[in-house]
Image (tube, helix red, strand yellow):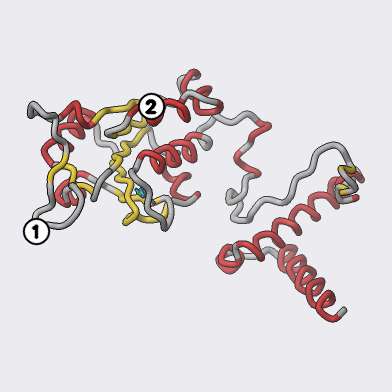
Amino acid sequence: MRIDILTLFPEMFSGPFSTSIIKRARDQGILDIRLWNIRDFAQDKHKMVDDTPYGGGAGMVLKPDVLVRCIEAVTDTRKVPMIYLSPQGKVWDQSMCKRYAKLDGFVLLCGHYEGIDQRVLEHWVDEEVSIGDYVLTGGELPAMVVVDSVARLLPGVLGSEESAVTDSFYHGLLEHPQYTRPAEFRGLKVPEILLSGHHQNIARWRLKESLRKTMIARPDLIEKRELSEEERQILDEIINEKDSRKEE
Ligand code: ADE
């Protein structure tokens, strides 16, 4: 997959993209990340990329001519989806990760200052994406989040040890708790069932703890979900446990 990133600060990406799993994916040729400095497409002698907004007001707006020169250099004759990162966008989630992971490539445009000229947004951008309801100083960190979350879904990027299939969200539930040795640490014990070697009981315990965690932290995910008969039964168990604790 090829991902082109248009930014005023390409140097911000060097750490995250040359470490760990993303580094390995790039070295293996699974992921081809190309960084473009928007400022290289400014043509005046001051290399100006932004200007004051028409109508007045605070902040600066990225200039359409500079942006479109950069976009046209990047896309050339290719037709690739263009994502603009901004707090006004659709909130990025796992289903969007899966959708983008199926493509040959896409382009990420990082904004700064007060944003980009609306004409670029309307005529060159395919999708506006936010990574959450808070405001960052620019689109670079969100672009890294998008790359990381898509890259790990590409075939061959995660080893079987790191499999994406058992992740939180992959099946629409949060992940169950995990424990490792020692079986007792400062008097705190690992749940007995995990030491039992009984795979069926362990699988049921994990599903129960996933449901419990999701019910507490993200009840909206439970409401959206089509529950299986087993899940419905387990949820009833959890609710009854809570009720009986209340009565004590
Ligand atoms: N740029 C600034 N804040 C952002 C956010 N929350 N998501 C995407 N891009 C942004």
Q: Is 36 positioned to the left or the right of 1 in the image?
A: left
- In the image, residue 130 sits, relative to residue 239, either above or below, namely above
Disc 1: which residue: 55
Q: Quadrant of the C terminus?
A: bottom right
Classify residue 208 as left or right of residue 67.
right
Residue in front for this viewpoint, 228 or 71: 71
Which amino acid type is marked by label 2? Ile
Instruction: Identify the residue under disc 2.
Output: 33
Q: Secondary structure at mark 2?
A: strand
Q: Position of residue 20 (x, y in %)?
A: 56, 26
Q: Is mark 1 within 8 Å of ligand 1?
A: no
Residue occupying the point 76% across, 59% down = 208
Q: Earlier in the sequence, mark 2 or mark 1?
A: 2
Residue drawn at x 43%, y 45% is: 99
Q: Dot 2: within a 10 Å radius of its alpha carbon, few (fewer than 14), some, or many (20 or more) residues?
A: some
Q: At which x and y percent is residue 8?
A: 27, 33
Q: Tell me the crowding category of disc 1: few under 14, some 14 to 19, or many 20 or more residues within 10 angstroms, Cα based.
A: few
Instruction: Tell whether circle 2 marks a residue whose Cβ is less than 8 angstroms from ligand 1.
Output: no
Q: Amino acid at mark 1?
A: Gly
Q: CA distance from mark 2 to mark 1?
A: 38 Å
